[in-house]
Image (cartoon, rainbow, N blue to C red):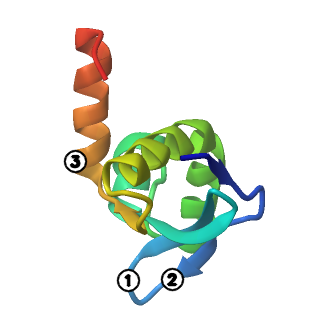
Amino acid sequence: MNITFSDDAPSFDGSNLVLRFTAYVDSEPVDCAITAESLEDHFGANSPQEDELRRAFERGRARIHAVCARAIEQNDGASVELHSGLFRVERLAQDRGTK
C-alpha cells in the first residue's frame, strides 16, 4: 500500500470541528480528518478557531501524516478521523521504542 498526502491546505469543517485533508492510497484519494481537540492537545492550537487549527496543523503536518498513514494501513485504506487518543497511544509506543 503506497500512501502519500497532498500538500494542499486542509479544509475547515466548523460543524464537526475538524480539519479535512486528502491522502492518496495507491493513487486513489482518501478523505481524512483531524479533530480540533487533537490539534489543541498535541500541536499547540490555542482554541478551536480556524486560523489556530490551521497553524497547528502546519506545525504538526509531518507527525499528523505519519500517524494518519499508520491508521490507514491498519484499516485497509479506508478514510480516517484522527482523535486525540490516537496521538497519545502513538506517543506511548514511541516512548517504549515500539510501533
Q: Residues within 10 Å of mark 1 (few under 14, many from 20)?
A: few
In this view of the protein, which residue sits in the foreground, 64 or 98?
A: 98
In this view of the protein, which residue sits in the foreground, 94 or 36?
A: 94
Q: Amino acid at mark 1?
A: Asn
Give above or below for 92 relative to 46: above
User: Farthest residue toward the top?
Assistant: 97
In this view of the protein, which residue sits in the foreground, 72 or 18?
A: 72
**Quadrant location of the C terminus in the rendered image:** top left
Q: Amino acid at mark 3?
A: Gly
Q: Which one is earlier in the sequence, the residue at label 3 or at label 1?
A: 1
Q: Amino acid at mark 2?
A: Asp
Q: Residues within 10 Å of mark 3 (few under 14, many from 20)?
A: few
Distance Cα–Cα, label 2 vs label 3: 20 Å
Can you identify the residue that label 1 sits on?
16
Q: Which one is earlier in the sequence, the residue at label 2 or at label 3?
A: 2
Distance Cα–Cα, label 3 vs label 1: 17 Å
Number of the label disc, if any, that sits on residue 13: 2
Number of the label disc, if any, that sits on residue 85: 3
